[in-house]
Image: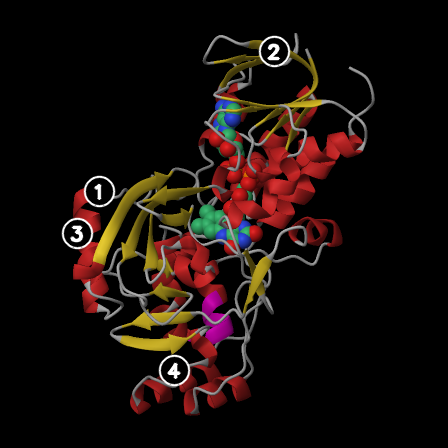
């Protein structure tokens, strides 16, 4: 019997256990995988270390900052780039049009000036036009949306945007069209990355004195009798249940959930990533820490350089790149792993990032849960499901437990909910 049973040992689950311990309570984590970390984990290929996609530390929250500060880290300036039709533009494109031909800049700026007035629209495509004008919107973020979110922009709501997209003034657009000496307008001033051990080193401080049980995949929950069954036959009774399991999967474990709840949960879906990671026997691979690719015919939408995050990620004298290709039930990946690796390998030469001949490590893997998709009506369906869980006394945490666009620090904070659980069983 666990006073507090936590499903999932990603940062949200680890944080819940850590906060429980801080308040003098006992918690047990059941993690389906072989070790903790979830999305923050990494893997090694022939001496190269790769995170599960691009990951940097940042936060305004003091408690999470205190966790980050326990690890020796490197500070990076957020200097991202964009690749489109053979050109490299600083990020974000809307106020960095400098590399475009003059006539294209004129069209983009005119359309920015003539953009529709800002409204309360909940249609992401319309929202983009209102911020940037139709020319910039359609050429850059609308195309990127289809690659990254795997849906047409008009199918997305605007509820996830927050401060993620920079909305420049006319002066900034004009300035960025005339020079590439523009100030950084990225929504974060700096990014942190552990000097050693990959991104997961940041969460090591949460692992002390933890009751983590790996290989425990929860498959059934009986909320009346308050127990969880695992695939390996383990039955564990609990006082309080906290879950970071993806919401649709959690509802599948609750046999008695009403049809309407199951239907709402069944309509929640996320993107997945096909990750291709390459190690090079050469000291340089591209010039950027990370960049976005807009061309529709190139499958990956984002690429980052693990060796630039920290040299500890590669053997001496080597470099590395990781390519993210997004897919989902709306846009299946219609290419085999071998074909994707072959395409990416060719891309390395085409984009002049490095020489394909220098590749000495290759890895392909799929991350099944990347981003929850904010298609229209999603938040209503999600809130309906969360309300049902609330009635059962199950506390959801984390990106897929709460079904939200949460960063690591927000997942850490969601683990703090454990402090609100009533004492006793
Ligand atoms: C491409 C990408 C880039 C990102 N970049 C950044 C970044 O730069 N900075 C940042 O702060 N955040 C970033 N994030 C977000 C960050 O990765 C997540 O917010 C965070 O890792 C989510 O943690 P979690 O614990 O909620 O979920 P997860 O990490 O998914 O953990 C859930 C855990 O539950 C386990 N589990 C699942 N089902 C079961 C079951 N039935 N029984 C038991 N265990 C189960 C899983 O194995 C997993 O370990 C990024 C995310 C993505 C996808």
Question: Mark 1 near ligand 1 (CB under 8 Å)?
Answer: no
Q: Which residue is drawn at 45% across and 52% down?
A: 156
Left or right of residue 404, residue 360 in this image: left
Which label's residue is closer to the chain start, 4 or 1? 4
Start-end of magenta stretch:
128-133
Local crowd size for mark 4, using a 10 Å CA cut-off: few (<14), some (14–19), many (≥20) = many
Q: Earlier in the sequence, mark 3 or mark 2?
A: 2
Question: What is the distance, in whole Å, between disc 3 and disc 2 at their CAs?
Answer: 46 Å
As drawn, 238 above or below 137: above
Tag on residue 337?
A: 1
User: Label 2, label 1: how many angstroms apart (C-alpha)?
Assistant: 38 Å
Q: Is residue 129 magenta?
A: yes
Which of pointers 4 and 2 lies earlier in the amino acid sequence? 4
Sequence-earlier tag: 3 or 1? 1
First-in-chain label (2 vs 1): 2
Q: Name the residue under label 3.
A: 342
Residue ID for mark 2: 236
Q: How crowded is mark 1: few (under 14 residues within 10 Å), some or many (20 or more)?
A: some
Residue tagged 4: 108
Left or right of 153? Residue 165 is right
Q: Residue at x 46, y 11 (%)?
A: 232
Calculate the distance from the C-alpha at mark 4 to the C-alpha at mark 1: 38 Å
Which quarter of the picture shows residue 69? bottom right
Q: Say if the magenta span includes residue 165.
A: no
Q: What element carries label 3?
A: helix
């Amino acid at each position: 019997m666990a006073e507090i049973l936590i499903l999932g040992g990603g940062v949200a689950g680890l944080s819940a256990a850590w906060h429980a311990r801080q308040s003098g309570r006992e918690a047990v984590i059941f993690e389906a995988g072989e070790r903790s970390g979830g999305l923050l984990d990494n893997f090694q290929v022939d001496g190269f270390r790769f995170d599960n996609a691009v990951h940097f530390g940042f936060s305004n929250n003091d408690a999470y900052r205190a966790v980050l500060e326990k690890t020796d880290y490197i500070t990076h300036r957020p200097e991202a780039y964009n690749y489109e039709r053979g050109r490299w533009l600083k990020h974000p494109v809307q106020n960095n049009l400098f590399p475009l031909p003059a006539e294209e800049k004129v069209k983009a700026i005119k359309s920015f000036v003539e953009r529709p007035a800002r409204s309360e629209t909940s249609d992401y495509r319309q929202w983009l036009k209102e911020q940037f004008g139709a020319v910039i919107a359609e050429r850059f973020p609308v195309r990127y949306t289809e690659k990254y979110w795997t849906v047409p922009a008009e199918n997305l709501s605007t509820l996830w945007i927050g401060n993620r997209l920079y909305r420049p003034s006319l002066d900034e657009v004009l300035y960025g069209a005339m020079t590439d000496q523009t100030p950084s307008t990225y929504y974060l001033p700096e990014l942190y990355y552990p000097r050693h051990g990959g991104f997961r080193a940041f969460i090591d401080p949460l692992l002390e004195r933890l009751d983590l049980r790996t290989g425990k995949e929860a498959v059934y929950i009986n909320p009346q009798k308050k127990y969880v069954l695992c695939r390996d036959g383990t039955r564990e009774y609990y006082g309080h249940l906290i879950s970071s399991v993806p919401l649709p999967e959690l509802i599948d474990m609750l046999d008695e959930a009403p049809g309407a709840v199951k239907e709402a949960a069944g309509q929640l879906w996320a993107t997945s990533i096909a990750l291709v990671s390459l190690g090079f026997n050469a000291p340089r691979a591209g010039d950027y820490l990370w960049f976005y690719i807009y061309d529709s015919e190139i499958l990956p939408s984002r690429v980052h350089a693990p060796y630039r995050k920290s040299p500890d990620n590669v053997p001496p004298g080597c470099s590395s790149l990781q390519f993210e290709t997004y897919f989902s039930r709306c846009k299946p990946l219609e290419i085999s792993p071998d074909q994707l690796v072959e395409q990416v390998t060719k891309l390395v030469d085409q984009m002049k990032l490095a020489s394909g001949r220098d590749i000495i490590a290759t890895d392909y893997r799929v991350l099944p849960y990347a981003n929850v998709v904010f298609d229209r009506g999603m938040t209503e369906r999600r809130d309906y499901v969360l309300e049902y869980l609330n009635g059962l006394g199950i506390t959801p945490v984390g990106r897929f437990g709460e079904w939200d666009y949460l960063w690591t620090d927000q997942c850490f904070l969601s683990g703090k909910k454990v402090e609100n659980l009533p004492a006793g069983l």
